[in-house]
Image (tube, rainbow, N blue to C red):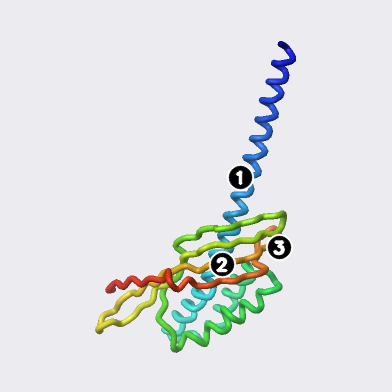
Amino acid sequence: MKISKKISLLLIVVLLITATIGFTASAANEKEINNIKDVLIKSVTIADKAYIDFNNENKKGSLKENKSKIISSHSENVSNVFSEKISSDMKKKWIDDTIEQVADGPDCIEAGVSNITMNEISIKGETATVTAIITKYLIDRVQIDGKQCLDKMEGNVIVAATLAKENNKWKITEFNAQPDMDSTNHTLTIE
């Protein structure tokens, strides 16, 4: 009878230790997933936010004076999200080339992410692979029938990315983002 109690007690202790270790690992994994989500959200909004800053300065007539400050700020954002290996290409595409679109582009006043769904995620040590659907939006100021309106465009972007830790922070090393044109919708409101 004493052996049976000892075995039962030992089994309970082992189960408690296993549950505690599992909970700790799960909490750490959840933290890593949230950090990765944050990187993905930033990655799909950098170009839009740079455009908005360039556009605002262009409307004020101060783009020429503030151009280098805006480029520097958003280039730093790119470096915080993308690995050194690909950040220079992303800066060229998303920051340097964006300034050329401001003169003839829409009057975009806001951009952001309203939802992120992680479809697949695999974290192995210092690397992760992810597939996610990110719902992002842009709000443009437009004229319709002589009335000032806000056009909110919202739709999904399907992101596939590989990330690696650099200085204990997740950064994207491979990136593919495809808009899901069928998911896009517009909401017009009069200002």
Question: Looking at this view, is 126 or 182 the one in front?
Answer: 182
Tell me whether circle 1 and circle 3 mark residues in contact (CB < 8 Å): no
Q: Residue at x 51, y 70 (%)?
A: 45
Numbered disc 3: secondary structure: strand
51 left or right of 25? left
Question: Looking at this view, is 110 or 10 the one in front?
Answer: 10
Q: Is residue 11 visible?
A: yes
Q: Kindly identify which residue carries mark 2.
A: 159
Question: Looking at this view, is 67 or 162 the one in front?
Answer: 162
Q: Kindly identify which residue carries mark 1.
A: 27
Numbered disc 1: secondary structure: helix
Who comes first in sequence, dot 3 or dot 2? 2
Q: Residue at x 61, y 45 (%)?
A: 27
Percent position of residue 164, x then y: 69, 62
Numbered disc 2: secondary structure: strand
Who comes first in sequence, dot 1 or dot 3? 1
Q: Quadrant of the C terminus?
A: bottom left
Gap between marks 2 and 1 measured at Cα: 25 Å
Percent position of residue 65, x then y: 52, 85
Q: Nearer the viewer, mark 2 or mark 1?
A: 2
The numbered dot on residue 174 is none
Q: Kindly identify which residue carries mark 3.
A: 166
Q: Residue at x 55, y 58 (%)?
A: 119
Q: Which amino acid, by three-letter code, is at mark 3?
A: Glu
Q: Residue at x 45, y 81 (%)?
A: 55
Outermost residue to the top: 1
Percent position of residue 12, x then y: 66, 25
Q: Which amino acid, by three-letter code, is at mark 1?
A: Ala
